[in-house]
Amino acid sequence: METDVLIIGGGATGTGIARDLTLRGLNVILIEKSDLNAGASGGNHGLLHSGARYVCSDPEAAIECAAESKILKKNAGHCIEETGGLFVAVRGDKENYIADFPDMCKKFGIPSKKIDPKEARQMEPSLSDETIAVYKVNDASINPFKLSIENMNDAVSMGACYLSHTRIETFKIENKAIVYARVRNQISGKTHKIKAKTYVNAAGAWAGSIAAMAGIHISMIFSKGSLLVTSKRIANRVINRLRKPTDGDILVPGGVVSILGTTSVRINSPDNIYPTVKEVDYIISEGEKMIPELKTCRYIRAYAGVRPLVSMGKGNDRDVSRGFTLLDHEKDQVHNFITITGGKLSTYRLMAEKTSDIVCKKHRVSLECRTKTIPLPSTHSGEWSEPGVLVNDPFKPNTLEDPFLCECEMVPASAIDTVVDSIKNNGGKPDLSSIALRTRVGKGPCQGAFCSMRILSHLYDNGEIMDQSGINDLKYFLNERWKGEQSLLWGQALAQSSLKEMIHCGLFGLELV
Amino acid sequence: MKNKKHITCDITVIGAGFAGMVAAARASALGLKTVQVGNSSQLYFASGLFDFLGVYPLHSRTVLQDPLTGLSLLQKEMPEHPYSKTSLEAILKSFDFLARFLQSTGLNYIKPDKENRSVLTSAGTFKPTCMIPETISKGCLLKNDTNLLLVDFKGLKGFCAGQIADVLKKNYPNILTLSVGVPGGNGNLNPAYFATMFEDSSFLKEIATQISPFSDKVELMGMPAVCGINKSLDALTRLEKMTGLDIFEIPMMPPSIPGLRLKNAFEKKLAENNVHFLSQAKIKSPQFNGSEFILNAVNQNMETQIKSRGVILATGRFQGSGLHAQRGCIKETVFDLPVYQPDKRSLWHHLDFFEKQGHMINTAGVETDNVFRPVDTDGTVVYENLYAIGSILARNDWIRLKSGSGVSALSAFTAVNDFYKKNAAGDIDVSD
């Protein structure tokens, strides 16, 4: 395969770059080692920052967030719910931070408005009666899955190519440039060459290991952040704690649920990360100070993402700028290789723009970035979602012809079929995990106990699977769901998880096969 | 104001799951005046297969051919396990009692064999178990070269004949599949309702017509376990006659029809045995006055005060709500009995769902003496006449050991016998 630009990484940044470059007329191939948003782009709050969170700690990031949030609300409105946000201080929170906050917001041009705590509790009844200060800001919730798939869809509609489950094996480097990349399809195991003029490393937390394949060292720090999904939406707005950014201080509404986070735990590798019991308990104990209901509410799932931070020396991980790192490896003697990492979801478009600017310079393309002005189109296949994202699929009733296969989240067979088609059209294999990534299947209270088998049977029925691989698919899917729930199993959730074990181990004996 | 009723009885069984049903069956069979209080029966979730011991030791991850070898090793290595509190003879007697009881209701079970039986499930896997409904039993005739027909029904979710065939075809190459259209239905079948249709002759005939073209090509047929509810064996036998095939049922995920058959069979026979059943009721603030328990059974419109000499606690685990897990610890919900449990929540579960040793939380539960009376941390019996039976018992990871029904039947049988011996029987031998 040959192309102008090979982008490595299918997160918000990579897909954003794909769209940006195709809008400027370049040919693009994007490869992703698993599937869209498998890394930090899928493992975050889904918060579109107004910038207010960073006014005291990172003014530059605050200004970027404010500007980008405006652009995205205008151009990608269908991926955003304009919830508005509150910054809330409770008794015991530091007085001087509370006092400085409005001035800092003003200083950096971030709109904020003081609200009487009483009034705030009418707006958001779940707020603690210990609330002492509240400011209203322009935070919003954004659906990161929808965002990435829409960016990718738009790029593909203009000629870009998306290869999922495709990983870099090697770079062939000659005369200070990458000649081609050898890539391997993770499903078929087959390898092939992709020859590009420029290679963009947008692999997020894995950027260091991709760069290393080109002989370049990037000193990465991995900071794990864990998040909890509640079973229902607890507040209508984004609720931030009015204090220096730390753990367990943001609750973001995402469609029918709320997402509470995060933590910041230094880890050695970005692979196989899951929230621990200790993190879960800590997040809840912090969150309940703002919103007491968080102590007793039901949680559906916990997940974690890794912030890829590039080491700049000392300091704790929260003090490292959440700004992005853009490296033109010309200085490292590889002329056609660029790395973009770090940053945050809210500024993904800006990161894509800056990266694309360098690419275009290398390609002598003089067109300016157009993602600032051209709205992101809304497509049909963009209607899929992970936990906490907006559910805006039109509701379909449970009918004889089209029964719900996932009863908790009311996903009918026809929705599964649509998703299966779209996975196959993109060269992927329709298994439970890829279907779950694109629907609300398995996200409800039963956490896949029933729908997993129903959908698997449906796949067999339609000839999508024709050998015993369905059993392994089922086990993998259940185990992935499990990893997200095992740290928060108590009360009703524990009862439901025992039912799952009863069915899949007790009856089917899957632990023995 | 709610109505308040008063009842006095010999023994109260709290719980209407499998263990509670066996206890009520045994108690009423011994002539004890029995009250049973049920919140919601977990039998809807029961496979209807009675396990004895399917896997031991857990880390071996292999199915026990001969449960008795496993049992003697378990009794040696796990002295606190419910099976270690008694003898093999008692276990076999409890199964025997169970089989006879169910036979008297018309629900036939095949008695234990020396070896575990291997039952084909709707996932295409085989489950090791001990005592099985007769409607499932012909599945044991399946050999690698059997010409087998697997049948599913259009609209019955979660059961696909092609799936089972695809999973099995490596070792069982001669499988044909058939998707049967359901007269009058074209999509979403409710299993409980669907199962009742099999008791209708004209329905059976229509099904048989679709199957008959295969009669010459195969010798055995498997179908989802939905062939009738109260007359399942009769329905299956008629379908066999109409098609000329040996037929077996394949258990599938809940709602479980074999579980529902059990529930109906128990309920009917226990009513005949004059067991007083308080449905959808919960026990609130139980007391002991020195000689009797005073239990308030509360449901939506009635409160019943039960004075009872003995109590059998068969409330199940988290799913049945006999145990409740708070974020930090596990509690027993009726008597607040001490619960054996891991030290902290981070030990409850492994990161791997299928971890071979099982999850430690599944060993949590109520610890008892040798006749299943709950004991304090120092080993003293909490109440002379309070027994805990079934899945609430500690140190029995029943899902992984495949020991659920065995432990339930044994503990129910032993506990009721002990109570009877001490309180009613005098010198009569109640062991049979």
Image (cartoon, coloured by chain):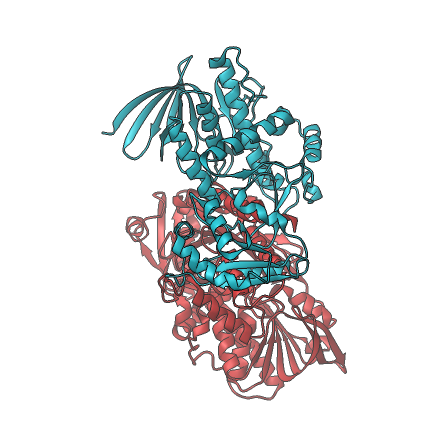
Q: Position of residue A237 (x, y in %)?
A: 37, 57
Is A362 left, or right, of B27 in this rendering?
right
The one nearer the camera, A334 or B104, is B104
Chain letter, colour cyan: B
Farthest residue in the right direction? A174
Q: Residue at x 35, y 28 (%)?
A: B297
Chain letter, colour red: A
Can residue B348 be seen here?
yes
Is A380 left, or right, of A270 in this rendering?
left
Q: Position of residue A333 (x, y in %)?
A: 73, 77
The one nearer the camera, A499 or A402, is A402
The one nearer the camera, A251 or A103, is A251
Q: Residue at x 44, y 77 (%)?
A: A376
The one nearer the camera, A501 or B422, is B422
Task: Using the image, determine if residue A83 lies above or below residue A284.
Answer: below
Say how many tags the image has: 0
